Image (cartoon, rainbow, N blue to C red):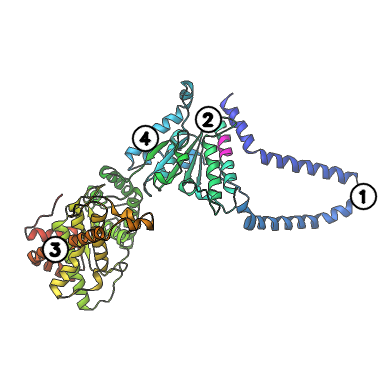
Amino acid sequence: MPQKFKIFLMNLKLQRTKILIITAVLALVMLAIWGMMSLESFYRNITLAQMPLQLIMVALNALIFVYMYMNLFKSSWGSSKKARVKTEQVNVKWSDVIGLDGAKTEAWEVVQLIKDRAKVKQIGGKIIKGLLMLGPPGCGKTYLAKAIATEAGIPFLSMAASEFVEMFVGVGASRVRQLFKKAQDLADGYGGCIVFIDELDAIGRNRTFSQFGGQETNSTQNQLLVQIDGLQEKEANVIVIGATNAPEDSLDPAMLRPGRFDRKLYIDKPNLDEREKTFEYYFSKVKYDKASIDIKRLARKAVYKTPADIENIVKESALIAARDNKEAVEFRHVSEAIERIDMGLKHRRNLVPKEKEQTAWHEAGHVVVLYLLHPTEDVFKASIIGRREALGVVHHSPREEWFTRSKESLLADIKTSLAGYVTEKIKFGTTSTGVESDFRNAMGIAHSMVWKWGMNSVGMVGDYTIYGTTGGRSSIDVFQLSESVKEKLNSDTQNILQKCLKDVEDLMKKEWKITEHIALELLKKEELEYDEIDAIFKDYGKLQTQA
């Protein structure tokens, strides 16, 4: 059957409702004319005279019905108005997907399978049914799905999983059937169709079998499973792409079995080279000062940033430059954009001189310990201008990607958190409530080191948090730990904190001149960039700690 004839038949199927309505209206008009012709002239004139009023009443009733339908009944009828998105309208080319080199390689294989579906069938293979994209938010899952549709050259239907879910049982299942019926019609005409379901976990989580709820989600998910790979009248080239930020094990096993979402694509945050390409791509869309902006350096500073984060940084930089009446984005605009996104907007508080001085010394202590003792982190900026609830902040960033944390790195985190407390105590002989968040962070890390990661000195190996004392599975599990075991673990947690405290005190006394220098600079300038901080330490002959 010729391709054009297939598309013609497909369009007839898609427009059959409109064709039936037009045919019915024409038939009724013809019957009305025939009926009017058969009446006597007197009755015909009366009927014609009443017709305008009747038309007005019909129109009014129709408007009232439509209003009630839109506002009261539409959500419970399970209608789905998703129209086909033409690939030329998607307009996301393969070259537009930046910062996902590994994922693009795997996704290209999927594109080739879609394009070569006839060849796959010829050798007895099975057309790919489902592709599941997993990864953190902002990494480009939806963007990559659009690029797959553009490259494959087939229709694209997109829907959020939450659009299927309603309070009435059966509504979601009805919408799933309508969506896949439309996809099958498009696949008949164009040889294939892509259905993209975003935030799949809204209907794809493990099913619950309870009389108290969950039936609607279960019903919707069951229908989706049947549509992807179940009892169908005919085999259609419908490829379902799902995207989720949820962990893979949170999805129902039936969704991940062969024949459904059996092909998985893991999309992670970009590495150094991918971040550099991403910065280059988004900076190409704005005017920027190439002399002051080092893209390679920015890529090194943007560890763990997603493509969406990088896009946001560049756009925010452009806004700051425009407010600053500059014709191009400069490095200081990028730096301020990163601060604003990561730490929040600046808001100056009217601090009394004593409190401002105490804040400066507190932050100076963090800077010294972070610079001299931390093996994996850099000082990005130090500030005594308030952000959110904090009076001051030391913003630091990792030098490179680490997917695990070493004991030395965790101890450095604790020491950095305690540095402000120690510095206040040495300088003023007292401390303030500004150490609250620092203590919370330090104790949380020390507790996890001892209770979860086996980094204790009492020789007790294992994750003791599973016994319920810190949010375990069952309250009964609490009794499985003896009081002596809890006492040993809690005591070792405090030993770690005390040891770190002693190391910080020794360092502060040894490097007090540098701490004083940084505190005075903060009081004078209020903010210090990395280059200024680095220059101070080099003036004293100090080198930064390396992993």
User: Where does the magenta region start and end?
Assistant: 180-184
Label whose residue precedes the other's in the sequence (1 or 3)? 1
The quadrant of the picture occupied by the N terminus is top right
Type of amino acid at the residue the image marks with label 4: Glu
Q: Which residue is disc 1 drawn over? A: 41
In this picture, residue 192 sits left or right of residue 444: right
Q: Residue at x 56, y 39 (%)?
A: 180
Q: Is residue 183 magenta?
A: yes
Would residue 376 be visible to someone looking at this image?
Answer: no
Query: Residue 501: image x %, image y %?
Result: 15, 64
Q: Nearer the viewer, mark 1 or mark 2?
A: 2
Q: CA distance from mark 3 to mark 4?
A: 48 Å
- Amino acid type indicated by mark 1: Ser
- The residue pinned by badge 3 equals 504
Foreground: 536 or 393?
393
Residue 106's label in the rendered image is 4
Residue 191: image tag: 2
Which kind of residue does numbered mark 2 sit on? Gly
The CA distance from mark 1 to mark 3 is 108 Å
Q: Which type of secondary structure does the marked residue at label 4 adopt? A: helix
* Mark 4 neighbour density, 10 Å: few (under 14) some (14–19) many (20 or more): few
Q: Is residue 418 visible?
A: yes
Alpha carbons under labels 1 and 2: distance apart: 59 Å
